[in-house]
Image (cartoon, rainbow, N blue to C red):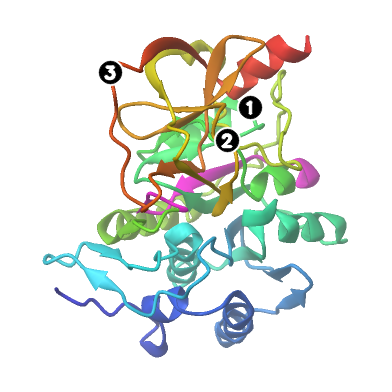
Amino acid sequence: MNRIERTIDDNANFSFENILQMRQKELKHNLAKELKAMGYSVTNAKGYLYAPGEIPVLLVAHLDTVHQELPTVICYSEDGRYAMSPYGIGGDDRSGVYMILHILRAAHCYVLFCEDEETGGNGAREFAKSNIRPKVNYIVELDRRGANDAVFYGCDNPDFTDYICEFGFKEAGGSFSDISVIAPKLKTAAVNISAGYYNEHRPNEYIDLEAMDTNISRVTQMTLTKTEHFAYMERKSRGMSFWGQQSIFDMEDSVRDRSRLLMPLPETARLILNGCELGRVSNYLMDRHGNVYAYLDELEAAVESENAFACDKDGKEIGFSLVEAKHLPILSFESAMEQLYT
C-alpha cells in the first residue's frame, strides 16, 4: 500500500491523517491555532469556529463524524488514490476540513467550522443564533459525497446555480447540511460541493484523494473569481422533517420521480441511519445496489433514505432477491411531503 502524507503548509503535525484521527474537541482546538497562524482573527464559540477573511466567500465544513472509533489504521490503495479504515475513515466531513485549509493557502476566504452536524446541525444553529453576519457573496460547504455534486437544498437562485455549474459541478439532490440552517439566516445563496468521500456513515467509507484534490483546485478558482452577491431565494415548495429539523430523505426535484424494483429488508437485517442502529426495519426496502428506501403506506410509494445502509446480523451485504422484489413508485422527499400535507 502506498502512503501519501498530505500536510498543511508543510506542517507535519497537521497532516490529513492527523485531521482524520483527532476527536472533535481536539480538532477544533488545533484548527483555531492553525487559523491564527494564517493571520486570521478567530472566534471560538460554543458549537463553532469562525474567522472573517478578505475574499467575500464563506467556506463551511463540520468537525464531527458518525464513527465511534478513531481511524488509527489508515489503508491506501496501491496507486495511493483511495484511503479507508476498518474503523470508518470519517471523510464526512474531515475531507472538507482539509480541503478548506488548502483553499485558504491561495484564497483568504471567510471560514466556519461547525460542531455536531451529524446530530442535526447543532453547531450551525448556534452560529445562526449569534450576532455574526458576515457580508459575503455566497457560501460554499464542502460536505457532499462523490466528486462532482453541487447541492442547493432550499436555495433556488438560478444565476447562482449556473455560476457553480460553470466549474464542472452537476446539480444534485440532498437532504440536509449546515448550510440548510446558515444560508436562510444570512440571506445568501449556498451550495454543498463534493468532498471526495463515498459510503459515508458506513464502516466501508472511503476517500477518493484525487477527487478531493481536483475540487480543491476548482473551489479555489471559484473563490478567486469576482462576483456580485447571490441572494438566498427560497424554493416555493420545501420539505418537512421527520428527525428534528434534519430530513433523512434525499430531496430531489419532483420531476425526477420514478419507479424502481425494491425488496423488503429481511426481519433479521440491521439498519444503520446516521451512524445509529434502528430497531424496526419493517417499513424499509432496498434496491439491487443496496440503497435503502422508506415505504410510505399512505402514498403506496417509497422515498430514498440518503444516510442509511442495511446489512445482515454479521455486518455483511444483504443479497438482493428478485422473488421478493416488486416495482414501486419512488418519490422525491419534496414530492412526498406535498402529497402528504396538501
Q: Is residue 205 above or below residue 85?
A: above
Residue drawn at x 28%, y 18% is: 322
- Which numbered tag is attached to residue 322? 3
* Residue 315 image position (x, y, % from top left): 37, 52
Amino acid at the residue labelled 3? Leu
Task: Give x and y (percent) for residue 46.
Answer: 79, 72
Q: Tag 2, which secondary structure?
A: loop
Residue in the image at 15% along x and 74% along y: 2
- Quadrant position of the N terminus in the picture: bottom left
The C terminus: image quadrant: top right
Depth check: give the residue in front, 294 or 134. Answer: 294
Query: Mark 2 is on which residue type?
Result: Phe
Disc 2: CA contacts within 10 A as few (<14), some (14-19) or many (>=20): many
Q: What residue is rendered at 60% in x and 37% in y?
A: 248
Of discs 2 and 3, which sits in the foreground?
3
Residue at 77% in and 47% down: 186
Of marks 1 and 3, which one's residue comes earlier in the chain?
Answer: 1
In this image, 43 relative to 208: left or right? right
Distance in Å between CA atoms under marks 2 and 3: 36 Å
Q: Is residue 133 visible?
A: no
Q: Splitting the image into 4 quarters, where does residue 90 fall?
A: bottom left
Q: Of the residues tagged 1 and 3, which is closer to the observer?
A: 3
Q: Nearer the viewer, residue 259 or 188?
A: 259
**Residue position marked by numbered label 2 in the rendering:** 152
The residue identified by callout 1 is: 156
Splitting the image into 4 quarters, where does residue 281 fall? top right
Assign a secondary structure to mark 1.
loop
Q: CA distance from mark 2 to mark 1?
A: 7 Å
- The percent position of residue 314, horizontal first and vertical second, equals 36, 53
Q: Which residues are magenta?
A: 184-201
| Numbered marks: total | 3
